[in-house]
Amino acid sequence: MADEVPRRAMWAGLRSQLVMLTSQFLTSADDYQRFRAVCKSWRSAIPLRPDHLPTQLPFLLLVSTSEPRFRSAFRLTGASTGNVCSLPNTANMSCIGTSFGWLILLSMEGHLINLFNPVTAEDIRLPSLDGLPFDHVAPDADAAAIVVEKAVLSSDPTLDREFVVVLFIRDVNIGWCTWRQGDESWTTNANPGVQPTSRMRDVVPYGNRMLCAIYGGNDCLAVLQVDPGPPGRATIAAWYGMPTCVPRTYRPTHLVVSNGELLLVTFDYNRTADGEMTPGFRVFRLEAGGINRPAVAIEVEDIDNRILFLSQSSSVSVGAEDLGFQGNAIYFVFKEENEQGEYRSLWNVGVQNLESGEITEVVDSDVPDESGLKWPVRSSDVPRWVPPNLCSYNQ
């Protein structure tokens, strides 16, 4: 009909307030980007990086410190994130932690620290570690070197300008230093009365400026309180033995913040109904405790409709609703030895169904025979699950 209004013009004519209101109901990062792509007026009505989206499926990021550079990102589904930007030049750099979608990168030569968001490509430069008293003489080395075991952020830098970076550094004892925005150098934190000596297994931020850490073979647990200062500091609020129901093991153990709760997930052997022992993950709901209030752990047989993605100090929990994935499951990365050629091993992605206990490999959708997803790595390459942080730090 001659007087018919073109459909494109009808959509483009919507009020910007209505477009903004409608965008708030979107929960997928991919859907949000398609929404912005409808027309120019819609793109100008809503921000490029929304603040309201729930936690998206994480992508598996491989940070390599070897040459040639391997800087790969693997996604289980296209709805996991928007555009994943290439990492900056990470030659001679090591990823020492991941928090709230930010990578914490350490330069092996200049002891420089960078925070990098692989989705927005934003970079935050931190002071050098030179001058700190934590020195460890590496074998066959002519000079002392700083050994960083773990690194975490107290809160999301895009939501909290008073976030604190905490570096756990290993010498004879485990100590830590802190930095917050505005500090010109790192602050060494004194911890009178408690000097952890066991190897740190995992550490995560949880609650309101709190950190939880486990040590040794799941022997000890510590709660740290972060004070934004200035200067930023972290002090031990509680230190005690792990509850006896948690198995003592040097197999992989992870702390995960899941739907407001703190979970401890450890690899162990489970007894089946017919008495056989099968390998798999055990999950405990952990109450970290505090002063004069010891930790409490309760084993759980399922995690409802949640999905856990496990990697050291960067484990992620998401809800299975609207993602097309089965809930009550754990995704993890494991390594199989491969001595052929220049690569030393192969990484694989496995998934455990907590209801049945069955463990299967994630299938590579690009391979016709539906073989497991595998990729070659060197011994220094570390895979991490990273939740996409779409918020902009510089806005």
Image (tube, rainbow, N blue to C red):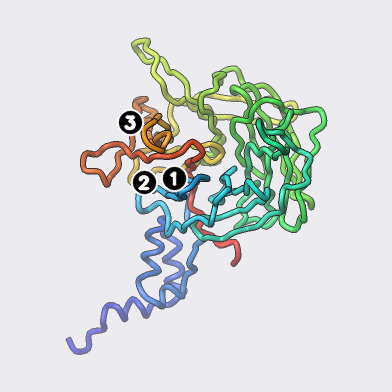
Please report the residue visible at 61 percent of the width from the left and 25 percent of the height from the top: 296
Residue extending farthest bottom = 2
Q: Does 208 sit left or right of 36 as displayed? A: right
Determine contact: label 2, label 1, CB under 8 Å: yes
* Mark 1, residue position: 60
Please report the residue visible at 45 percent of the width from the left and 48 percent of the height from the top: 70
Q: Please determine whether, in this image, residue 211 is positioned above or below residue 244.
A: below
* Percent x, y of residue 313: 56, 38
Q: Quadrant of the C terminus?
A: bottom right
- Confirm whether residue 170 shows in the render: yes
* Mark 2, residue position: 76
Dot 2 or dot 1: first in sequence order is 1
For label 3, the crowd category at 10 Å Cα-Cα, with few meaning under 14, some 14 to 19 and many 20 or more, is few
Q: Quadrant of the N terminus?
A: bottom left
Q: Amino acid at mark 3?
A: Thr
Q: Nearer the viewer, residue 64 or 387?
A: 64
- Tell me the distance, in whole angstroms, between the alpha carbons under discs 1 and 3: 18 Å
Dot 1 or dot 3: first in sequence order is 1
Please report the residue visible at 47 percent of the width from the left and 41 percent of the height from the top: 383
SS type, badge 2: loop
* Mark 3, residue position: 360
Q: Amino acid at mark 2?
A: Leu
Q: Amino acid at mark 1?
A: Leu
Determine contact: label 1, label 3, CB under 8 Å: no
Dot 2 or dot 3: first in sequence order is 2
- Tell me the distance, in whole angstroms, between the alpha carbons under discs 2 and 3: 15 Å
Residue depth check, mark 2 versus mark 1: number of the one nearer the observer: 1
